[in-house]
Amino acid sequence: MATYEFRRIEKDWQAYWAKNNTFKTENISEKEKFYVLDMFPYPSGAGLHVGHPLGYIASDIVSRFKRHKGFNVLHPMGYDAFGLPAEQYAIQTGQHPALTTDENIKRYREQLDRIGFSYDWSREIKTCDPNYYKWTQWIFIQLFNSWYNPNSNKAENIDSLIAVFEISGFTNDELSFTKEEWLAFPDKIKSDILLRFRLAFLSEAMVNWCPELGTVLANDEVKDGLSERGGFPVERKLMIQWSLRISAYAERLLTGLENIDWSDSLKEAQRNWIGKSEGCSLKFYSENTEIEVFTTRPDTIFGVTYLAIAPEHPSLDLLCVNEFRSLALDYTEKAKNRSERERQAEVKNITGAFTGSYAKHPFTNEAIPIWIADYVLGSYGTGAVMAVPAHDSRDYSFATHFNLPIKEVVSGGDISKESFDAKTGNIINSDFLNGLSVKEGIKRSIKEIESLNLGKGKTNYRLRDAVFGRQRYWGEPIPIFYENGIPKTFSENDLPLILPEIDKYLPTESGEPPLARANNWTYKGLAVETTTMPGWAGSSWYFLRYMDPDNNIEIASKQALNYWKDIDLYMGGSEHATGHLLYFRFWTKFLHDLGIIPTDEPAKKLINQGMIQGMSCLIYRVNQTSKFVSIGLKDQYETTAIHIDIQLVNAGNEVDIEALKAWRPAEFNEAVFELENGKLICGTEVGKMSKRWHNVVNPDDVCNDFGADTLRLYEMFLGPLQDAKPWSTQGIEGVLRFLRKFWRLFHNNAQENFNVSLESPSKAEYKILHKTIKKISEDIDNFSFNTSVSAFMVCVNELQDLQCNKKEILEPLVVLLSPFAPHIAEELWLLCGNNGGVSYANWPTFNAEYLVENEFNYPISFNGKVRFNINFALDMDAADMEKAILNSEQTQKYLEGKAPKKLIIVKGKIVNVVV
RNA sequence: GCCCAGGUGGUGGAAUCGGUAGACACGCAGGACUUAAAAUCCUGUGGCUUCACGGCUGUGCGGGUUCAAGUCCCGCCCUGGGUACCA
């Protein structure tokens, strides 16, 4: 035995790690902690494809590296196990989603185990496990029992708000009562008022209702008016819904970004999503009512030529008057009924109607017409805007379309051509604002507006509260019951509220959610909430549970929470930028406010691994026939492209027609094929890996053919971790060849026996080793794993040239390689005579002395063009070097008799002669 | 439209601080070993030009800064991702 038998080696060491609990992590340790977390997967029926492990491999490398460096590493894995696909499957087949989910999890686990990850499986969690969702429900109860105190700027128990009401009553823009009134309110009214403050609350909200899925969706689950999952139409609908008041945390979610090491693009996406805009509110008065607008440009107040209100505006009915009334209401009806999707599709289609009313300009007293416009959104700001066509492009288009006046109040543009939106230039035609810059004008105008009591400086956020209820079965039940129409929480002692068994996973005949089918769905004889939590509930706090997954009395022990604190490295896809990663931060801040956890950001550093795309193969059917043509011939016909299994195609894109017939006999047995040079060549397309496109590559197959270590190295070698790249096995041979070469360094070629020498290494050999230690250590810190793999290759090539088999060189290399290719490293570590496994071996120390050079072969360039090289001692005097260079025969040749103007010597880098 | 990435050989990519562009790997071509194959090893491989030495050219395009630019600045073009009337 001595050839590199990866199948045997990988099986053995995976068994060894499992048997010895090699990666089990303790919560009490003298070592410094390091928490590495992967975004846990939804266990879908399709299993893992080669794209999934990319991030897992990278985070596993970091985890193993940190263990070698002496850290106590927490590296767990689990499953985001509630979700729609299992439920859809249940509806179709009657199979309980828990069964499907368990089967899928089992398959995921097998696939993950084959790749050799160093997870502490004793901490595995599943969000659908009652021992887990008990705490998801518990957090919901805390949210319900909390309000956001703007003065302390954090969440507090609702009792502190009730105390305020009892002592001094309450007054704000929307609500006002004295303490006596509060005490006299009936319970239902009190409950309704408190719901306006609780962080988990019931409200009538405009939601994205998807009739096909029978549920409401969050904004980030809707793409182009279609549900992200399934692609069904989504409509706007007013419903009573549970929501979470994430908007209370908008400012902290924004400023918190400054202190975490996430990518700029991801932070930018969150900033845009939160959408902070500073401006001011301002009231306009019409004959019979007032209209409040929000603007970021109060400095342009003298440029207002009309007001525009949304079709949903509450005062609309009052404003539609005279002969315009019927036309206006007619328009409103149409605009309101247009679905979100239609509105989006027709962005450029300008529509609106005049109400017949006028408002008075607060400073000039001019009459300003009030229009209805569907470019104004009912749900943002106040649902009304002051239109300044000269300085807002949307107002400009509207004004141009309806022939409304355009009045320039900021100099610097040419308003006959387009609006001038920039916040530069000076204010003109504006009474007391004249001559001010835009910035000064904004300040001054707010001051004036405030002094006239017409409005005040105000900050708006785009971020909306998150709808939290789903009309679905496969999710966490919400621990709420209703007494006289008042929502009340379960006692914490009665959690978990277990998901009940039901006969069918469908809404009831009367349209209630599936939980209404459960027998005796009551608490203390009272009706229990029938909606369930959305998919993101369980994933918003799971990082905490890994710290102490079996705890029955709290989400995790204080000791565990204080030791592990937060995630040091969080690895996952960028598609979660505005969904999961925002909710995740929100819940963390909330739990921090209540003093439950020590940190207020969940993850210090976050890396987005890129997507591994699949190449799919297309063949072309001539329309209305069963004739298929090779790609070069398809332009001669009207054809339809059909996706075929990538397994049927070879590296030259040639389709194996016999295999094609065997794959789908009904479709292809009788088909006619028109070939090019005797071959059927298919077309290719790069995109998501999916069952639907028949282009899924299973990591199990790669492990069988090439080994897990090769898969791990190869996925890293493909390119920078963050980049998207198409999967192709071209090149995987090179990685396997590298591992074989590495293996052979330890083995006597002729007899194929393990054979390392105890001789002292040469200087050159030390240099190769230490160069590699330096490079690999730096690369891991920079997440530059592709260059690590090539550094290993260079190292092995060089040692092979020197025929080096010295233990003092090879043994440290085994440790260096072990985070990347742990199985082969374990095997060679054992062969080198070590017991106890390589996983906790010390990382080799880099010694810079071995890299010290006393000479350098300087490239000599003339006007920037390198012509030849000369060797100089590195400590050589610059003047001596200059003399030597100018005297060199070759220099004379390139000077062509001219005198050099200048000679630049960059020590250890380059010489440039300027002629 | 706006925001964020990115554009380097036949291919994936490297060049981490402005200093020899193309490391490493795939592919391809040629060779060694072998009865043969596999495996392994060696040589070559950006383009144009030259018998050769060499020369010219070259990092999406056009300018600029610099002794020196893939890297910095200005203006474009293209690709990928996010977002969508947010006042």
Image (cartoon, grey):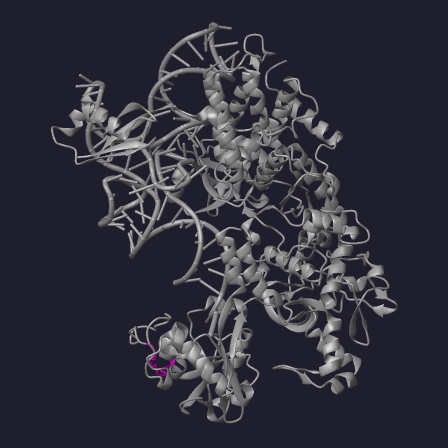
Q: Nearer the viewer, residue A664 or A39?
A: A39
User: In the figure, residue A407 lies in which quadrant?
Assistant: bottom left
User: In the figure, residue A493 lies in which quadrant?
Assistant: bottom right
Q: Nearer the viewer, residue B18 or A50?
A: B18
Relative to A698, say whether A374 is above or below: below
Q: Classify residue B69 as left or right of residue A796.
A: left
Q: Classify residue A819 as left or right of residue B52.
A: right
The boundaries of the magenta stretch are A401-410
Q: Nearer the viewer, residue A492 or A775?
A: A775
Q: Residue at x 23, y 28 (%)?
A: A882
Q: Classify residue A665 as left or right of residue A504.
A: left
Q: Position of residue B9 (x, y in %)?
A: 35, 34
Relative to A912, say whether A285 is above or below: below
Q: Residue at x 78, y 86 (%)?
A: A184
Indicate yes or no whether the magenta region holds residue A407: yes
| One can see residue A562 in this view | yes
Total numbered circles: 0
